[in-house]
Amino acid sequence: MPETKAPPLYCVDTSSFLHAWRRDYPPDVFPTFWDNLAESANQSLVVSPQEVLLELERGGDDVYAWARAHPDMFHPPTQPVQDEVERIVRRWPEFVPEDSEDGVWADPYVIALARVRGAIVVTGEKAVGPGARVPKIPNICSALGVLCTDLLGLIRANGWHF
């Protein structure tokens, strides 16, 4: 009997939620996108670190309300994730923002959770060139061998149609 391959796991960054909700896939036009995302989260195929939920809370808008309604999607940091965050921040100290009003910064947690869980990072960020002062999520994912895509990549890989 042929072995069935498990579906991939995706780890979603704050920028993906914000860009989708506000610009690319607003729920009044693409409700099926949000239904599919919620169903994938219910099946534990889409995750995000708890820090993403905290970043979404800053906006206090409808995307935060949607995220709060799907608490199982957002995972608190385990020790292996925290250890990986520490490795990322040590290797790329310039990745750490100079200022954060509330001390919340999800980017290294997204990458760390994906690396620990073998997930594909979903982000709205684009890689920057080698001369850039601050690397972006795709740059660090590439250096660590973590797969990275955007929302359209997630949609296509899962065969979602609207």
Image: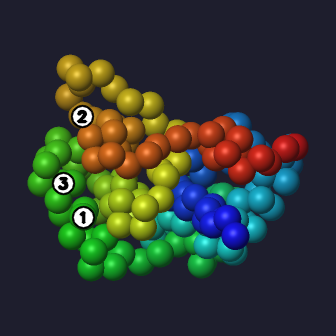
* Label 3 vs 1, first from the N-terminus: 1
SS state under label 1: helix
Q: Is residue 35 left or right of residue 101?
A: right
Judge whether 86 appears above or below 126 on screen. Answer: below
* Label 3 vs 2, first from the N-terminus: 3
Q: Report the amino acid beneath label 2.
A: Val
Q: Is residue 31 left or right of residue 91?
A: right
Judge whether 32 appears above or below 4 on screen. Answer: above
Residue 16 point in image, percent of width and height: 57, 47
SS state under label 3: helix
Mark 1, Cα crowd under 10 Å, few <14 / some 14-19 / many 20+, is some
Colour logic: rainbow
* Label 2 vs 1, first from the N-terminus: 1
Q: Is residue 26 left or right of residue 22?
A: right
Q: Report the amino acid beneath label 3.
A: Val
Of residue 17 and residue 144, the one placed in the foreground of this image is 144
Q: On the image, numbered disc 1 is attached to which residue? A: 84
Of residue 117 and residue 17, the one placed in the foreground of this image is 117
Residue 21 point in image, percent of width and height: 69, 48
Q: Report the amino acid beneath label 1.
A: Glu
Choose mark 2 or mark 1, whichever is in front. 1
